Structure formats: C-alpha cells, structure tokens
Image: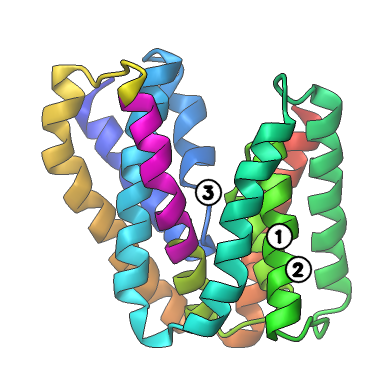
Amino acid sequence: MDLILLSALTLIASIVGTLAGFGTSTIMLPILLLFIPYPVALLFVGIIHFFDDLWEIILFKRAANWKLLLGFGVPGIMASFAGARLVVTEPSAVLSRLLGALIIFYVLLVLAKPKLKIPANTISAGVGGTLSGLIAGIFGIGGPVRAMFLTAFNLPKETYLFTSGAIALFIDPARLATYILGGTKLPQNLLWGLLIFIPITFIGSWAAKKFVSKIPQDNFRKVVALFLLFVGVRLLVF
C-alpha cells in the first residue's frame, strides 16, 4: 500500500478515533485487509490504536475522573477477559447482528430522549463497566460497546474521551503482546513507516481535540451517537 495513502488513512482514523472515542480499527482494518495479511493488519492497527489512546489521555488529562475510571474500567477489563473465555468459537453472524441491533436501538433512544442519563455513581459505573466488558469480550468489539455505556452517563465530552482512551490503553498492550509472541511481525516498510505514522496519530488526535472544543456539550453526545449508528448498521447488515 502506498505510503502517502496509508498516512492519509492513519490521519483520518486518528481524527475519528479521538473524536468519537472509538473507531480507529473500524476504519483502518477493512481497508488494510485488501493489501496485507490479517495478522499483520491486526498488529499494525493495534499499534496505531495504542498511540491514539495515549494521545487521547494526554490531551484530555485535565478532565480526568479517576473515580469513574476505576469504577468503570477495572470491572470492564476483568469482565472482558471473562467474556472472551466464554467464547469457544468465533461469534456467529446472528450474534453480531444482534449486537448491531442493540447499538442501533440505543442510538435511537438517545436521539429520541436526549436528556436520558444514568447517574455516574460507583454502582452504575461498576454495572456499566461489567456489562460493557462482558459484551466486548464475547463479541470482540470493545470501543463501540464501551462508548454506548459511557455515553449513557452523559459525561462532559472531555471526561468521556479521557475515560474511553484510558480504558483502551490498559487493554491494548496485552493484545499487542499476544500478536507479537504469536510470531506476527511487521514487514520492513511498515516498521520503518511507524516513524511517520506515529507522529501522524498525534496530529490527528490534536486536530480532533480542536474540533471537540468547538462542539457544544449538548450536541457532542449526538455526534458520538452517529458514529455508533454507523457501526450498528455495519454489524446488522454486513
């Protein structure tokens, strides 16, 4: 794949991933699979995803809510491993479509009742984290499911983005280590290309932060909902 095109893809995915709190893999993986083997694509996207998460927590660190992060993140991470252990085979198309339908239902609910909110206290954070982690572990789709539960708290946009990035940052290293220990390696052109792609992820995240600052708080939840709707339709139809 051409270096310029891959750089442009990385930039777009980083902007969307930071803006919505998820979506980097959703954008990059289907395109990369047209050019490189699946394991290599997973490793490459995982590295890009890791740095997107890192920039996200650095850029939005002032909005950190550590109590919420621990209350949602710790049960979520534990439940994601538990959910993954429940899956003996790859989830069927029927289950994926059910998840897509659930996401679409949630989006329609948010759009119909924009004031809908679950109190972001310790109990609801723990329940939301556990359910999101369990569903993510079973279906293998972490970002959209996490976003669905976090947006239910109707958090300040910066707190939502920090929390989403921080949780993903805890999960990504284990995923990357699994790929590498399993023998997956990046070809030389992609490996050296990281010297360009990693700075591009920061540029994308920085640009997204500037855009987020211009979105009114009342409209930000709708912006995330639109990205969720795209994922939900993709799961339901494809």
* Residue 127: mark: 2
Mark 2, other Cα within 10 Å: few <14 / some 14–19 / many ≥20: some
- Helix, strand or loop at label 2? It is helix
- Helix, strand or loop at label 1? It is helix
Name the colouring of the figure.
rainbow
Residue span colored magenta: 166-180
Of marks 3 and 2, the one in the foreground: 2
- Reply above or below: 92 against 23: above
**What's the CA distance linking mark 3 and mark 2?**
24 Å
Q: Which of 22 and 226 lies nearest the eye of the viewer?
A: 22
Q: Which residue is mark 1?
A: 130
**What's the CA distance linking mark 3 and mark 1?**
21 Å
Quadrant location, the N terminus: top left
Q: Which residue is mark 3?
A: 23
Q: Residue at x 41, y 46 (%)?
A: 172
Mark 3, other Cα within 10 Å: few <14 / some 14–19 / many ≥20: many
